[in-house]
């Protein structure tokens, strides 16, 4: 189900078309009081009994422009008080057009900061653009199968502390590494940020001037492989 009030948000016109034309899942348009989207969640038990109740995953849809609406804060607080399993989740569209963009990463980080003080902050799921929404939700609402062992950390993330001009004597701090891993999902994304003035400003704002300059300098250096 999706809330009919989404039609009143001009920035979501592309998303509305995707929801109404979807056949799997097929969305029913209705009035939802506390959330924008609801999807059935499969039972965790691989052999469910007739006594198990079906569960529903609740979602709140936010965009960079919606963060400027004073009512959004009120909606977030009310949404965070909902008690449900699986936990209600916020979907943040980084782009409301068909094309993904990294220009709205600062807005995403600002929303993370806004959620942090809440007593029960909802999970926050970034969506690159509307076409990615349905496939992401299908993965997100699929009951996970038990894994035999925890997956090892991605090699790219292991290298994050070393991508500064002060390494190896002074690698990036643990805090800075965590912030950088929230900003970027790969070393390639870090390199892309360093290529533009806007990206370098983002790094300076979130990593601090000194460590941000170290990361930028790392990618500006010339590397010779023998």
Image (cartoon, rainbow, N blue to C red):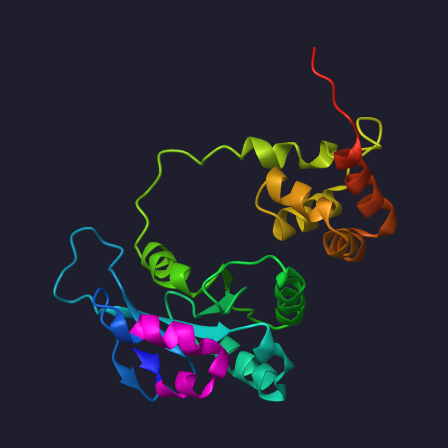
Q: In which quarter of the image is residue 156?
A: top right
Seen in the image, is 130 located left or right of residue 114? left
Q: Does the magenta stretch include residue 15?
A: yes
- Residue 123: % across, % down: 50, 64
Q: Nearer the viewer, residue 214 or 119?
A: 214
Please say if 59 is above or below 174: below
Residue lying at 36% horizontally and 77% vertically, measured from the top left: 16
Seen in the image, is 178 located left or right of residue 131? right
Residue lying at 61% horizontally and 37% vertically, measured from the top left: 157
Residue lying at 45% horizontally and 77% vertically, measured from the top left: 12
Residue range highlighted in magenta:
4-19
Q: Nearer the viewer, residue 87 or 181?
A: 181
Residue lying at 22% horizontally and 64% vertically, measured from the top left: 24
User: Among all residues in the image, which is located at the extreme left?
Assistant: 50
- Residue 94: % across, % down: 54, 64
- Residue 221: % across, % down: 79, 30
Q: Which of 120 and 65 is in front in this view?
A: 65
Quadrant where the N terminus is found in the figure = bottom left
Quadrant where the C terminus is found in the figure = top right
Q: Does the magenta stretch include residue 61?
A: no
Q: In which quarter of the image is residue 121?
A: bottom right
- Residue 21: % across, % down: 26, 72
Q: Nearer the viewer, residue 36 or 43?
A: 36
């Amino acid at each position: 189900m999706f809330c009919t009030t989404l039609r009143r948000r001009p920035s979501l016109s592309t998303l509305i078309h995707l929801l109404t034309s979807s056949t799997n899942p097929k969305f029913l348009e209705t009035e939802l009081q506390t959330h924008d989207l609801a999807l059935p969640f499969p039972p965790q038990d691989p052999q469910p009994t007739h006594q198990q109740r079906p569960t529903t995953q609740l979602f709140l849809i936010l965009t960079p422009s919606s963060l400027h609406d004073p009512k959004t804060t009120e909606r977030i607080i009310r949404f965070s008080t909902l008690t449900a399993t699986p936990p209600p989740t916020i979907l943040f569209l980084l782009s409301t057009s068909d094309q993904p963009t990294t220009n709205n990463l600062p807005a995403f980080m600002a929303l993370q900061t806004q959620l942090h003080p809440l007593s029960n902050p909802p999970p926050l799921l970034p969506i690159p653009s509307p076409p990615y929404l349905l496939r992401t939700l299908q993965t997100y609402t699929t009951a996970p199968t038990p894994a035999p062992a925890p997956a090892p950390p991605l090699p790219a993330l292991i290298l994050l502390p070393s991508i500064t001009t002060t390494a190896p004597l002074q690698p990036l701090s643990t805090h800075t590494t965590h912030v950088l891993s929230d900003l970027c999902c790969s070393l390639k994304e870090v390199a892309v940020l360093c290529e533009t003035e806007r990206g370098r400003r983002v790094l300076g704002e979130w990593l601090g001037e000194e460590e941000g300059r170290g990361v930028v300098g790392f990618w500006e250096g010339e590397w010779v492989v023998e």
